[in-house]
Image (cartoon, coloured by chain):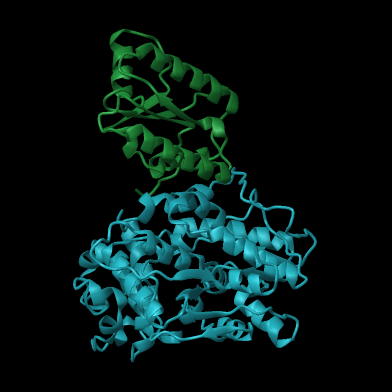
Chain colours: A cyan, B green
Amino acid sequence: MNLEGIIQETKTYYCLECGKCTSVCPVARYDPSFSPRAIIEDALLGFEDELVFNQKLFSCLTCYTCQQRCPCDVDFPIFIRQARAIAQGNGQHGIYAHSGQLQSLARLMTSPDIKQRRLEWLSKEYRISDDSDVLFWVGCAPYFEPIFEDIESRALDITEASLRVLNFLGIEPKLLPDEKCCGHDALWTGEVETFKSLAEHNTKLIKEAGVKKIIFSCPEGYRTFKLDYPKHGFSVDCELQHISEFLAEKIEKGEAKFNWIGKKVTYQDPCRLGRHLGVYDAPRKVLESIPGIELVEMEHSGWDSVCCGTSAFTNCDSYSNMIRTERLSEAASTGAETLITCCPKCQTHFRCAMVDKGEKKRVIPRIEVMDLANLAANALGGGK
Amino acid sequence: MAEFEPKIVAFACNWCTYAAADLAGTSRVQYPPNVYIVRVMCSGMINPDYVLRAFERGADGVIVAGCKYTDCHYIDGPVKCDAMFAKLKRLVHILGLEDERLRREMISTSEGTVFARVVEEFVDQLKRLGPSPFSALGKEKVAV
């Protein structure tokens, strides 16, 4: 797609140049050279080269904060995504975090001949069944384990906790040993071909599995399956649910009974789950129904919450770290002892900010970061 | 059909292994021509993505080689390399790559013959294993 097509698709021509996007943008708050308004202006004036060969194109968090404030509903995140595809076509990409391993992994996974060993962590304590009509999407968590070992991301803990929750509520899910990366990061960094190849594999696999429902512990996978697969012509024809929505449903039916956990917590809305998909109430409902949990909201919460600072593992710089530190300070200032998130990547990024040794001048607040699935598993009595 | 000729990418540190490969050449030690040597300043600067990209572009095996622990010009390069290599091994294991496609070697400057022997062994090993599971990707254009 060319620039003109993107402008048509995302209705960029409606832009009033009011600058609300730049004033709310978490990146622009710290990085004066990044401005969504200026990027849109470049596009409308037809300065394609200025737009595409600008590193700042990859600094956008695609967190949808700007799109919510926009008075004329310009879809800026999608604009960025499409512009990145053009940039990739011109051999441009952002500065990949973690030396680009995660992007390389996604590309390597597109090879048809691989036989992954992604379920080796699975121990016998989890009950899984191949005949089940509920599928649990594992996602990238097994790969995060070696990559983020030293920052104690522990994304796999979230996966295991989710399995415990499902088992405890009487569901023996099916797991797919051959699932591949959902392609979220590839799509949002502009590698559309990689995304399509992964999506094709995954949808075929799910159709063969013949399941009726897929449960995700990762909002990024959830978003990709729910919005991006159908948009690119891959549909899975099943019910999709995030683990928090699943828990909220069970609570409504009165099937989930939690044990007492005395904790003051605050909740970080992941941008994919919150602003992208509009799931704000389900995680809060889960938190409220655990006895002993006191939920205090941060200054910016719900649709107004601040992103964890990096998306798609691209352009993670000192500005990202500032966003993260600010968010952690906000969480700590509520007086909560634990910051609950719903996204393995939020957990990874916040924990990374707290072990960062490069930031000597600023005080990074310490607060326990935990996923909702872990808390729920503990409260159900299935915790470790 | 012609016999399968594996492609090997060797990341070799400037001070030891690259010099050893050079010595193997100047001493006219014979070894298979399957290896593509990439000179790096220190084995400690190799990151997992270098190796992943080599596989992405059609390498069948990768050698990560550098100085011995006491020879490093930058004090602790080999220790860093070991830590990286352990991580990388776990990563490619999940990805489904055979463990034998990765080799960590420490070859000192004077060991030209050792370098030649390592390459010979590795070529034999890879011939038994066949093409890498990612070889289908190597033929396509890959974004840099």
> Can you say which quadrant of the picture contains the N terminus of chain A?
bottom left
Q: Is residue B7 visible?
A: yes
Work out which residue is located at the far front of the displayed protein and give it: A262
Q: Quadrant of the C terminus of chain A?
A: bottom right
- How many numbered markers are drawn? 0
A44 is higher (above) or lower (below) than B142: below
**Front-lying residue, A357 or A133:** A357
Does A112 sit above or below residue A56?
above
Residue drawn at x 50%, y 80% is A265
| Closer-to-camera residue (A326/A186) | A326
Residue shown at the point (35%, 55%) measured from the top left: A96
Please identify the quarter of the rendering in which residue A303 is found. Answer: bottom left
Residue A241: give x, y in percent of width and height. 63, 75
Tell whether A95 sits left or right of A211. Answer: left
Residue lying at 47% horizontally and 43% vertically, measured from the top left: B87
User: In x, y percent, where is residue B132?
Assistant: 54, 35
Residue A140 seen from this side: no
Residue A130 in the image, given as x and y percentages of width and height: 77, 58
Of all residues, the one furthest to the right in this rendering is A131
Q: For residue B71, what is the image quadrant?
A: top left
In the displayed structure, A78 sits above or below B68; it is below
Residue situated in front as seen by the camera: B69 or A86: B69
Residue A296 % position (x, y)? 48, 86
